[in-house]
Amino acid sequence: MTDIRANLERVRERVARAAERAGRRAEDVLLVGVSKTVDVGRIRQAIEAGVPALGENRVQEARGKIAEIGRPVPWHLVGHLQTNKVRDALELFDLIHSLDRLELAKELDKRGRARGCAVGTLVEVNVGGEASKGGVGPDGLGELLEAVAAMPHVTVRGLMAIPPEAKEPDASRVWFRALRKLGEQHGLSELSMGMSGDFEVAIEEGATIVRVGTAIFGPRGGV
Ligand SMILES: *Cc1c(COP(=O)(O)O)cnc(C)c1O
């Protein structure tokens, strides 16, 4: 049985130490507990233990969980978003980490207008240029941001990246640094980067949001 409270406590200590090493404040790093495949009972344990926000990667899965749990903490969408799921996503999520194409931005703007709100997003950047991954290439980022800037119902708060898989946490450092540089170039302050294997390095490189699943909830069985 995974001790979620103890795991969360340990992750928070590691976040605090990494922030301290970087001369930053731990409060400036939002810890998102990624609860994909995790059942409602265990998510509730994390909420009771004080997880500040939750992340899901599929709209469908999140819908059932949020219907049961409600929103005592904000929910973030960290996974790919299909345009035909946008309407549902806007009902469920406080922040969408995965804006990665113009077509999706247009749909978010349209649905945001219908709801009378501006949709909070991060633009996902494919920093490693991997064919298997979503995200706009670093070269296409400027153009996408420019187009979205003209959309009144979409707000870009920052950037998100899932760097190439690596054996050593330190191997992700160059990718995190690249994302930070892109954020600086475009005047975007939020950086969603770092997962269970590398969130400390991400914080050292400027992450303002880390997305941590396994280190809080334990291994995802059978997925
Ligand atoms: C699953 C997932 C995470 C969390 O991964 P862990 O290695 O379990 O911490 C973070 N970000 C995204 C986009 C994910 O899909």
Image: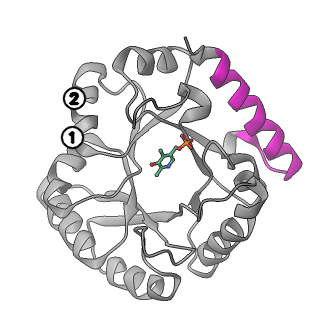
Q: Which mark is residue 64?
A: 2
Q: Residues within 10 Å of mark 1 (few under 14, many from 20)?
A: few
Q: Could you say whether the residue bearing mark 1 is in a helix, strand or loop?
A: helix
Q: Residues within 10 Å of mark 2 (few under 14, many from 20)?
A: few
Q: Main secondary structure of the magenta part?
A: helix
Q: Position of residue 23 (x, y in %)?
A: 86, 51
The structure residue drawn at horizontal position 53% and vertical position 30%, both measured from the top left corner, is: 219
The structure residue drawn at horizontal position 42% and vertical position 69%, both measured from the top left corner, is: 132
Task: Give whichever of 222, 80 is nearer the camera.
Answer: 222
Quarter of the picture holding the C terminus: top left
Specify start and end residues of the magenta stretch as a single range.
6-26
Q: Which mark is residue 27?
A: none
Q: Which residue is mark 1?
A: 60
Judged from this view, the residue extending furthest toward the top is 1
* Amino acid type of the residue tagged 1 in the rendering: Gln
Q: In the picture provided, is 19 more to the left or to the right than 74?
A: right
Q: Quadrant of residue 187?
A: bottom right
- Asked if residue 15 lies in the magenta stretch, the reply is yes
